[in-house]
Image (spheres, rainbow, N blue to C red):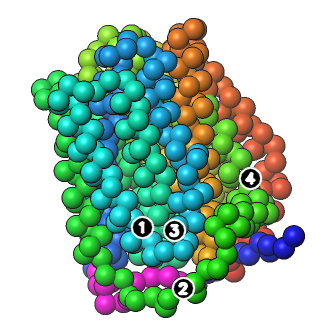
Amino acid sequence: MAMYPVGKGDRSGMSESTENQQPACGVTAKLLEAFPPFASRHFRLYFVGQIISMIGTWLEIVAQGWLVFEMTGSAFWVGVAAAASSIPTLLLSLIGGMLVDRYPRKLVLLCSQVLLMVLSFLFGVVILTGHATLPVILVLAFFIGSVSAVATPAIQAFISEIVDRRHLPVAVALNSSIFNASRVIGPALAGFMITWIGTGGAFIANGVSFIAVIAALLAIRLPKAPPRPASTEHPIQSIRDGIIYAWRHPLIRTIVLFVAAVSIFGWSFMSMLPVVAKRIFGIGADGMGYLYSAFGLGSLFGTVVVSVSSGRVRSSHKVIGGILTFAFGLLAFTFVSWLPLALFCLFISGLGMLTAFATMTGTVQRLVEDRFRGRVMSIYLMVLLGLMPFGNLLMGLLSEHYGTPVALRTGALVTIAATISLIAFRKEIAKAWEEYQSPCEKSRQH
């Protein structure tokens, strides 16, 4: 068996040409000091296009959950529909990562966005024409999830091509803020759209939103990179190499295992918010949107926490503190019956979740060698998103038999237990982190 040495990351600065970065002064300079990736024109284009597209995606996520619950009245089937969207990540992420490492990342990303746009239009037409049955919804959700399984590692790898390597943690946090800023706007907008034009209209609006990110990608002109050597390696062997590399890297392995536990027992609570809205608080689609938006607003504030603390607070502290904040906020949410206080608990949970996950994603991005980037990010995202279907199904079953509050409390308590185990091994983790830090990162801490 061939040996796969664990490298300490490709530390070559991968940034766009300097003509795309303009000197700034005054307020702009201070903003760029806090959020340096915005100095890149490419990143600005990507950011604007992606945030419009993601608002549309949240329209789709909320509309799908509401549609299924309205059709079935079952928390279990809401979980199944959410699982149908995310299970392709478990099945296809590794293939997506292999494609990202073999072909131009911008091209892979562009093709995936076009396919997602077509599928969203199709979904909307099916609903508007009255052909939306539960099996049809599950099949279309699976197809959308399949394309997303390729798009997601492509997005993560593409970020490393449009910002400087030293700015990757902040860029990752800002990329996460796209998801969460859109979570503030999208669900609230979805609630009103479902009320006034129905779930089919929400899917059509999502299809239109993809035009923004497609236009942004077409406007990004990267410097011509040297052609990659044609790979003669069998795709299965290529995927296997990526798995072995990730497993033999002590920090990446630790992060991936921890993310697995949090994905199944913590993150999956989102699929139950339509049930919570209707059964616990007795609110409609517009009120349900507020629940999603509160979590998203907290996540948006988490972006600021990550950006301001970059280089000042140890990554391990941000991960542990963030996950505990998320879990205790979620635990408190399950005991609350007053809507404003529930929104505050979700805000706190969102802040903690973003702080932890942006830090972990940025750490993986900085440590991985570029030739393995697509495959390693696909493994990371496969665990983060691909294991979520099991969590969605588990939350649905527990909710159906023991009540939604009990299901969410169980997930929060298991997440806390996983974090305590991480704290128990903090010395080993810190030692590994010191070993894999670059000299400049070590000097900044001292």
* Residue shown at the point (38%, 88%) measured from the top left: 223
Residue under circle 3? Answer: 100
Residue 64 x %, y %: 33, 30
- Of tags 4 and 1, the one toward the viewer is 1
In the image, what residue type sits under mark 4? Thr
Residue under circle 1? Answer: 108
Cα–Cα span, label 4 and label 1: 29 Å
**Where, by quadrant of the figure, is residue 378 drawn?**
bottom right
Cα–Cα span, label 3 and label 4: 24 Å
Cα–Cα span, label 2 and label 4: 31 Å
* Residue shown at the point (49%, 91%) measured from the top left: 226
Q: Which mark is residue 254?
A: 4
Residue 348 x %, y %: 46, 35
Neighbour class for label 1 at 10 Å: few (<14), some, many (≥20)?
A: many
In the image, what residue type sits under mark 3? Val
Which circle's residue, 1 or 2, is located before the other in the chain? 1
Which circle's residue, 2 or 4, is located before the other in the chain? 2
Secondary structure at numbered mark 4? helix
* Residue shown at the point (37%, 14%) measured from the top left: 72
Asked whether the residues under the numbered discs 3 and 2 touch, taking CB atoms below 8 Å apart as contact, a structural biologist would say no
Residue 413 x %, y %: 66, 25
Query: Residue 15 magenta-drawn?
Result: yes
- Of tags 3 and 4, the one toward the viewer is 3
Magenta region: which residues?
A: 12-24
Residue under circle 2? Answer: 228
The correct choice, above or below, for 280 with respect to 265 in the image is: above
Image-based side of 29 in relation to 11, left or right:
left
In the image, what residue type sits under mark 1? Val
Q: Which mark is residue 96?
A: none
Residue 331 x %, y %: 56, 23
